[in-house]
Amino acid sequence: MHIALLSRNRNLYSTRRLVEAAEQRGHTARVVDTLRCYMSITSHHPSIHYKGQEIEPFDAVIPRIGSSVTFYGCAVLRQFEMMGTYVINDNVSITRSRDKLRSLQLLSRKGLGLPITGFAHSPDDIPDLITMVKGAPLVIKLLEGTQGIGVVLAETNQAAESVIQAFMGMKANIMVQEYIKEARGADIRCFVIGDKVVASMKRQAADGEFRSNLHRGGTATVIRITPEERSTAIRAAKAMGLRVAGVDLLRSNHGPVIMEVNSSPGLQGIENATGKDIAGMIIEHIERNASPARKAPPKPKG
Ligand code: ADP
Ligand code: MG
C-alpha cells in the first residue's frame, strides 16, 4: 500500500516511527506537510495539490494534525475523504476530540464515567456553577487546551470564583470540573486501536504538581488496567468515532472517569513505557481495514 502521513514535521518521533513501521511491513509511506496541501473542491474531480502538482493517490491517510492547525488540517483530511481515501481517523471525530466539552457531552450520552463538569456563560451563575461541581478544590480548564496548559486547580471557592471571572472576562471558553483528589496526580493512558486497548501506561505527575502530562514533567510506567477500565476506554473511542485514540482515565472512588480522548496520541511515551510496537499495530490495522485505492475496474475482454 501507499500511505500518506499528514504531519507538519517528519522528524517527530511518532511520524518517524509510522514511516518506519509502514516500510518494514512492505508499504511505501510519504510524509505530507498538512499546510502545503491545497485543494480544488469540485463535484466531478475533487483533488488535492501539493507543492505545485496534483497529489498521487494514496490507499490510506494517517492524520497527525496538531491542535494549532485543527481547522486547516481537518479541511485537508475531509478532502481526502471526499476523494474516497481511507483515513484512519476522520475529520469529524478529530474535530470532536479537540473540544473537551463537546467530547464529554458525547460521552455522557453513552453513560460513561466522567468527572462532574459544569459550563456557564454569565458571571452571575458562577456561585451556582461552583456548587454544581461540589465546590473547591476544583479544576478549571480551557476547552481547547493541550499538554496541561490551561488546566488550573483552584483550592478555595474564592480563588475559583475569581479565576472563572477572569477567564470569562477574557472571553476564553472554560469548563469547571470536580477535582478527583483520590487519583493523586496520576492518570491512565489507554491506547486504543480498533476495538482493543493495545497498551496502557500510568502517568504520575511530578512532585507538587497535579497534572500528569509528560510535557509537565510526569513519568510513565506500565500498568495493568481493570476490565472496567478497558471497556470504558474502548467505548469512549467508539463514541467519538475514533479508530486510533489515546483515552485518558482517572481512578476515582466511583470507578474510572474519562479525562479526555486524544485523536493524535503520541507514540514515544507509550512505546518507551511498554516496549510495544504501537506504530506497527496501527499499520496492521490499516492493512486489515483499508481497501486498496480505487482503481479503474478491469476492461471487459472481447
Ligand atoms: P490537557 O488536554 O491539557 O492534557 P487534561 O484535561 O487532560 O488537559 O488535564 C491535564 C491533567 O491534569 C490530567 O492528565 C490530570 O492529571 C489533571 N487533571 C485534569 N482534570 C482533573 C480533575 N478533574 N481531577 C484531577 N486531576 C485532573
Ligand atoms: Mg490530557
Image (cartoon, rainbow, N blue to C red):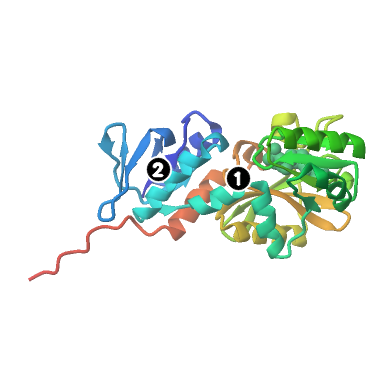
Crowdedness of circle 2 by 10 Å Cα count: few (<14), some, many (20+)? Answer: many
Q: Is residue 47 left or right of residue 288?
A: left
Q: Amino acid at mark 1?
A: Arg
**Residue 168 picture location, percent across and down:** 74, 37
- Which labelled disc corresponds to residue 29? none
Does the residue tagged 2 have its C-beta within 8 Å of any atom of ligand 1?
Answer: no
Q: Which residue is mark 1?
A: 98
Q: CA distance from mark 2 to mark 1?
A: 22 Å
**Residue 246 picture location, percent across and down:** 64, 48
Which residue shows up at 55% across the image and 33% down it? 13
- Tell me which corner region of the image, top left, top right, bottom left or bottom right, holds residue 29: top left
- Which labelled disc corresponds to residue 4? 2
Which residue shows up at 40% across the image and 36% down it? 32
Q: What number of labels is visible?
A: 2
Q: Is residue 35 left or right of residue 44?
A: right
Crowdedness of circle 1 by 10 Å Cα count: few (<14), some, many (20+)? Answer: many
**Residue 244 picture location, percent across and down:** 56, 51
Q: Is residue 64 left or right of residue 170?
A: left
Vertical comparison of 60 with 196: above or below? above
Which residue shows up at 66% across the image and 37% down it? 146
Residue farthest along the left direction in this orientation: 302
